Amino acid sequence: MAVIQFIKGINEAIIPDIKLTRSRDGSTGTATFRFVNPQILEVSMGNKGEITGMYLLDEEGELVTRDVNAKFINGKPHAIESVYVIKNPEHWDRFMRFMERYAKENNLAFKKANK
């Protein structure tokens, strides 16, 4: 099972838009996740705890980033943006294994950006 959580134990049901960047030599990169109207920002979630990061969980373990920001429209939370930094080829491979599992479970497809 591959899931994304903002508060440990609570799976985020909203599927994010994910943009990947990779260095020319392929050794580093970033993954930017954007969740529009995520469940974790609903009023009913207010008593569940604080958002302490974004946790990508699967059978291999967890990947964590603390770079999590809420976006507001007219004073109300609208989206969450989170950046996961990939620091070396091993981390890139591990991140892609998570993404393959997450994509398969959520019927997602990879689309290469035009340059």
Image (tube, helix red, strand yellow):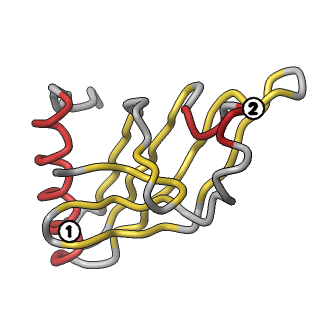
Q: Which residue is drawn at 34% across and 69% down?
A: 63
Q: Residue at x 48, y 58 (%)?
A: 54
| Separation (CA) of disc 2 from disc 1 | 38 Å
Q: Residue at x 37, y 40 (%)?
A: 19
Q: Which of marks 2 and 1 is in front?
A: 2
**Above or below, comparing residue 17 to residue 88 in the picture:** above
Picture coordinates of residue 51 (x, y %)?
63, 58
In terms of secondary structure, where does tag 2 sit? strand
**Above or below, comparing residue 31 to residue 27 in the picture:** above
Rendered image: mark on residue 83: none
Residue 87 found in image quarter: bottom left
Tell whether 51 sits left or right of 23: right
Residue 43 found in image quarter: top right
Q: In this orientation, which residue lies closer to the viewer: 61 or 68?
A: 61
Picture coordinates of residue 80 (x, y %)?
60, 40
Q: Total marks drawn?
A: 2
Rendered image: mark on residue 25: 1
Picture coordinates of residue 17 (x, y %)?
40, 31
Mark 2 lies on residue: 77
Residue type at mark 1 is Asp
Residue type at mark 2 is Pro
Residue 26 found in image quarter: bottom left
Picture coordinates of residue 102 (x, y %)?
20, 44
Q: In this orientation, which residue lies closer to the viewer: 75 or 114?
A: 75
Classify 10 Å Cα crowding around label 2: few (below 14), some (14-19), many (20 and above): some
In terms of secondary structure, where does tag 1 sit? loop
Classify 10 Å Cα crowding around label 1: few (below 14), some (14-19), many (20 and above): few
Farthest-out residue, top: 74
Which of marks 1 and 2 precedes in the sequence?
Answer: 1
Q: Which residue is drawn at 55% across and 63% down?
A: 53
